Image (cartoon, grey):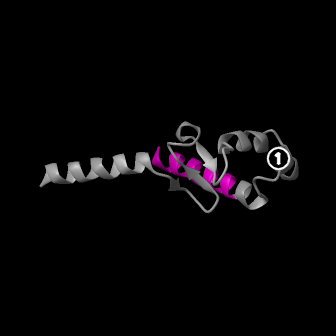
Amino acid sequence: MIANSCRDFNFEFIKLKKMQHALGKYIVVDPKICHGKITFKGTRIIVADVLDMVAKGNAWEYIIEQYHGNISKAAISEAVSLSKESLLKTINAA
């Protein structure tokens, strides 16, 4: 029974590694795009790069302009929110 569970888990993990996985409405991870880094859906814009710009104090309008309107305020907001959730989970797990 345990062997089957492990095999099923490994199969599901392998399937996940081969396909796009939505982390939100605007944010995805796809092993075929940008080496599996987290990106904004339908783009090759790496979420971490945008979060770096936010952390440096850049206005969201400026960030959107730098990416030629290929991301929205809602997408940036989702990135910030997911980042916050991840931080809180890490803190609570410690």
Task: Please name the predominant secondary structure of the magenta segment in the image.
Answer: helix
Q: Tell me: 3 left or right of 36.
A: left
Q: Residue at x 63, y 54 (%)?
A: 41
**Residue receiving disc 1:** 63
Residue name at image x 20 percent, y 54 percent: 5
**Residue furthest left as drawn:** 1
For the N terminus, give its image quadrant: bottom left
| x, y percent for residue 63 | 82, 46
| Residue shown at the point (50%, 50%) measured from the top left | 92
Helix, strand or loop for disc 1:
helix
Q: Nearer the viewer, residue 88 or 63?
A: 63
Residue at 78% in and 41% down: 53
Residues shaded magenta: 78-94
The answer to which image quadrant residue 49 occupies is top right
Q: Is residue 34 above or below residue 5?
A: above
Q: Residues within 10 Å of mark 1 (few under 14, many from 20)?
A: some
**Above or below for 70 versus 57:** below
Whether residue 33 is in magenta: the answer is no
Question: Horizontal placement of 1 versus 19: left or right?
Answer: left
| Residue 92 included in the magenta stretch of the image | yes
